[in-house]
């Protein structure tokens, strides 16, 4: 066999061995230098008893002495427990779905001090939620969701710190009440909307009435100004005319004008008013006018 074939066989053999090593245990078991990815940490167990953590970049490992126990992410991770049923203090059975976010701050504790930190955090979220909500009424839970979530987060801090974790956030995903309570809440919402609509309508009507009253006030003031102006002009024209006669004249004139408007209204059918209403005042005004004309002629 030609030598070139021996080289090909050797190359393929080396590649095959490397592939087997990679998929069975990783290169770190056989190589003194490893590269750790960004936002990742490797927990190393030393057979001599000194556990350690290696972080992003090139790190040195001693084959057969350093063992990679676990590779963990240092990124924020979401812990989403299953929804749980909780009976509130006022005996309402609700289904609560919570979610939490945590970060690993001590990889050795997270890996070596607890079997499964994700499972433990889920249990902690559920137990803390049950303990907190079981002492509250349903209406208070609805109103104070943000405060409750902060209290649960504070309650989890101590345990998570023992596991090398930091609690970033705890929040409600959903709160599902029984169907009967949900229907009652929907009716309450509809009633509240109707109440607000009624208040807005009443306020609008009140505003309209205020505008009408203001318009009437302005109209009365203008009429008073016009009447005062007429009285002034009549006194200048006929100084001897008494105030009583002037008021009688104005009242009669206003009465006739109102009758005319009434007769032209779309709702009026047949209107009667005295035909001699204006006659007394016509006589008074004519007499006063004639007397003034005589005085004027005499002066001339």
Image (cartoon, helix red, strand yellow):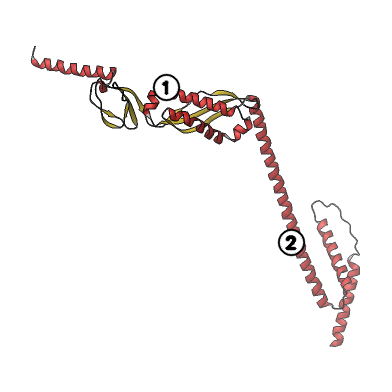
Q: Could you tell me residue 87's position as x and y percent?
A: 61, 24
Residue 24 left/right relative to 79: left
Residue at which label 1 appears? 116
Residue 164 left/right relative to 180: left
Q: Image quadrant of residue 258?
A: bottom right
Dot 2 or dot 1, earlier in sequence? 1
Labelled pair 2, 1 in contact (Cβ < 8 Å): no
Q: Could you tell me residue 233's position as x and y percent?
A: 79, 74
Q: Nearer the viewer, residue 134 or 243?
A: 134
**Residue 291 higher or lower than 54, as above or below:** below
Which residue is found at the position 49% from the left and 23% from the top? 123
Locate the N terminus and report the quarter of the image it occupies: top left
Which residue is found at the position 90% from the left and 64% from the top? 277
| Mark 2, secondary structure of its residue | helix
Task: Estimate how packed mark 1 is, as few (under 14), some (14 to 19) or many (20 or more) residues with alpha carbons within 10 Å.
Answer: few
Locate the C terminus and report the quarter of the image it occupies: bottom right
Residue at which label 2 appears? 218
Which residue is found at the position 30% from the left and 32% from the top? 56
Q: Real-space Cα distance between discs 2 and 1?
A: 82 Å
Q: Nearer the viewer, mark 2 or mark 1?
A: 1
Q: Could you tell me residue 192's position as x and y percent?
A: 67, 37
Q: Could you tell me residue 286's position as x and y percent?
A: 88, 74
Q: Nearer the viewer, residue 241 or 61?
A: 61
State the mark number for residue 53: none
| Mark 1, secondary structure of its residue | loop
Residue 39 left/right relative to 203: left
**Residue 105 higher or lower than 221, as above or below:** above
């Amino acid at each position: 066999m030609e030598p070139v074939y021996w080289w090909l066989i050797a190359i393929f053999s080396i590649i095959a061995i490397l592939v087997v090593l990679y998929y069975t245990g990783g290169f770190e078991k056989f190589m003194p230098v490893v590269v750790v990815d960004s936002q990742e940490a490797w927990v190393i167990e030393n057979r001599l008893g000194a556990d350690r953590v290696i972080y992003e970049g090139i790190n040195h490992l001693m084959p057969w002495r350093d063992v990679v126990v676990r590779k963990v992410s240092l990124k924020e991770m979401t812990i989403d427990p299953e929804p749980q049923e909780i009976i509130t203090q006022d005996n309402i059975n609700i289904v609560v779905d919570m979610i939490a976010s945590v970060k690993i701050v001590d990889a050795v504790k997270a890996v070596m001090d607890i079997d499964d930190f994700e499972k433990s955090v889920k249990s902690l979220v559920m137990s803390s939620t049950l303990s907190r909500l079981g002492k509250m009424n349903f209406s208070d839970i609805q109103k104070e969701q943000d405060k409750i979530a902060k209290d649960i987060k504070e309650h989890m801090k101590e345990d998570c710190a023992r596991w090398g974790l930091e609690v970033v956030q705890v929040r409600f995903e959903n709160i599902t009440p029984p169907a009967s309570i949900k229907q009652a809440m929907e009716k309450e919402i509809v009633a509240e909307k109707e109440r607000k609509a009624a208040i807005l309508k009443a306020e609008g009507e009140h505003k309209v009435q205020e505008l009408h009253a203001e318009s009437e006030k302005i109209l009365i003031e203008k009429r008073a100004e016009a009447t005062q102006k007429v009285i002034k002009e009549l006194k200048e024209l006929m100084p001897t005319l008494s105030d009583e006669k002037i008021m009688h004249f104005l009242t009669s004139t206003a009465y006739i004008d109102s009758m005319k408007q009434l007769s032209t209204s779309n709702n009026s059918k047949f209107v009667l008013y005295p035909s001699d209403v204006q006659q007394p005042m016509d006589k008074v005004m004519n007499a006063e006018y004639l007397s003034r004309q005589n005085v004027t002629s005499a002066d001339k």
